Image (tube, rainbow, N blue to C red):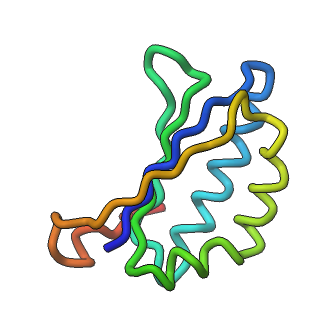
Amino acid sequence: MLVACVYVHVLPEYRDAFLTATLENARNSIKEPGCLRFDVNQGADNPDYFLLYEVYRDEQAATAHKSTPHYLQWRDAVANWMAEPRQAVRHVGRFPESEEQWLTRGG
């Protein structure tokens, strides 16, 4: 599994709009066949910081995500709302070991 942790620092005046746009992107992302999880986390100590925790079946699924209409819409909408460029750190998921255990339930 490919895990991407995306760290985003949002300008305070765009916090609510960023969260709304990001939740919409997440809801659509988990419908992609290769996207197993898409978690949106907001800082407990500083609500202007977000962590997007994304799990993809493989590299191809992660690449496909970046060409979807919902991602492109999100990317363009939030581009000027960030206090600094977002940072993505990629990982190899080692546990859980099965794809089914990574799946987002419900949606």
What residue appears at the point 68 percent right and 40 percent down from the top-left corner? 85
| x then y, percent, for residue 29 | 58, 67
Q: Picture coordinates of residue 104 (x, y %)?
A: 38, 64
Determine the residue positioned at 80% across, 20% down: 13
At 72% from the left and 27% from the top, the residue drawn is 83
The answer to whether residue 55 is above or below residue 53 is below
* 83 or 17: nearer the viewer: 83
Q: Nearer the viewer, residue 84 or 73?
A: 84
Quarter of the image holding residue 8?
top right
Count of marks overlaid on the render: 0
Q: What x and y, as percent, mark residue 77?
A: 83, 49
> Does 75 sit above or below residue 83?
below
Front-lying residue, 19 or 91: 91
* Residue occupying image coordinates x 49% and y 40%: 51
Q: Quarter-wise, where is residue 57 in the image? A: bottom left
Outermost residue toward the top? 45
Image quadrant where one finds the N terminus: bottom left
- Please indicate whether residue 39 sits to the left or right of residue 31 in the image: left
In this rendering, the answer to whether 80 lies above or below 95 is: above
Q: Position of residue 87 (x, y in %)?
A: 56, 45
55 displayed left or right of 47: left
Report which quarter residue 12 is drawn in. top right
Q: Is residue 55 above or below residue 41?
A: below
